[in-house]
Image (cartoon, rainbow, N blue to C red):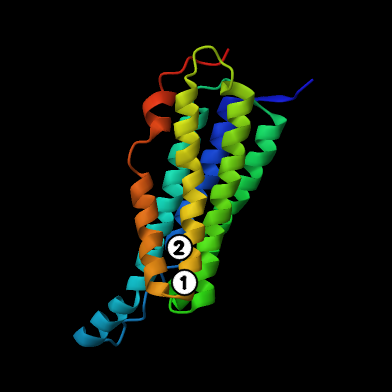
């Protein structure tokens, strides 16, 4: 027999980790010491915080996109089994880790290993989400009489593209760290657009 958990507890715990990780991102934006600053030095100090702000915005969007897709996948389920719980824990571990590479790229964004490390972290997080997605599809959606398989194919391709794009962007850092950084910003913006998951998953019947 499989062990099941009520979805409310599952979502509450997951949402809490997502929220904490997103909050921790802003902590890395340090307030500069402006106690004896002039107008020009204050402006320079603020300019120096721009990389940290950009890394914060990027990672906030990354975690936000993952949260949106996580919610879209599970909002119809009544319960989840132990395998989902285990995979989800690994995903949450990756989510909670994101503030660390975010702080690194904000401080040392011109160093190729740091830029690549950031992208590989996001790619790995996307891979774990895909493991969760495909398990949930196989366990709850595949073979369901009211689930259009074209939806599953479209949503799966959309989901697979996420870690692949970050992997490509991270590898491009060998040629241009600037290009990789730009792609890191554009990828979550692209995934904010409604996808097959948003358009069709909402029409699926509730799990009983």
Where's the C terminus, which quadrant?
top right
Q: Residue furthest left?
A: 39
Q: Residue at x 55, y 67 (%)?
A: 117
Q: Residue furthest right?
A: 1
Residue 58, percent from left and from top: 39, 59
Kindly tell me whether residue 104 is visible in this rendering.
Answer: no
Please give left or right for residue 120 compared with residue 59 in the image: right
Distance (Cα) linking label 2 and label 1: 7 Å
Mark 1 residue element: helix
Above-or-below relation of 169 to 9: below
Please give left or right for residue 187 compared with residue 66 in the image: left
Residue 2, percent from left and from top: 76, 23
Above-or-below relation of 176 to 145: below
- The residue closer to the viewer here, 26 or 93, is 93
User: What is the number of the mark on residue 169?
Assistant: 2
Residue ID for mark 1: 173
Q: Residue at x 42, y 61 (%)?
A: 26
């Amino acid at each position: 027999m499989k062990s099941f958990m009520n979805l409310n507890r599952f979502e509450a715990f997951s949402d809490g980790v997502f929220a904490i990780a997103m909050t921790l991102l802003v902590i890395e934006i340090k307030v500069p010491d402006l106690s004896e600053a002039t107008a020009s030095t204050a402006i320079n100090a603020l300019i120096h915080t721009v990389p940290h702000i950009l890394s914060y915005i990027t990672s906030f969007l990354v975690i936000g996109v993952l949260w949106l897709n996580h919610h879209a996948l599970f909002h119809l389920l009544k319960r989840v089994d132990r395998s989902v719980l285990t995979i989800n824990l690994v995903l949450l571990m990756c989510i909670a880790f994101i503030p660390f590479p975010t702080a690194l790229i904000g401080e040392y964004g011109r160093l190729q290993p740091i830029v690549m490390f950031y992208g590989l972290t996001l790619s790995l997080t996307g891979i774990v989400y895909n493991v969760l997605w495909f398990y949930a599809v196989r366990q709850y959606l595949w073979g369901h009489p009211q689930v259009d398989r074209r939806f599953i194919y479209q949503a799966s391709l959309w989901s697979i593209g996420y870690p692949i794009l970050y992997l490509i962007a991270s590898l491009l850092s060998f040629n241009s760290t600037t290009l990789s950084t730009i792609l890191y910003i554009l990828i979550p913006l692209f995934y904010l657009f409604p996808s097959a998951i948003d358009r069709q998953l909402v029409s699926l019947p509730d799990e009983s």
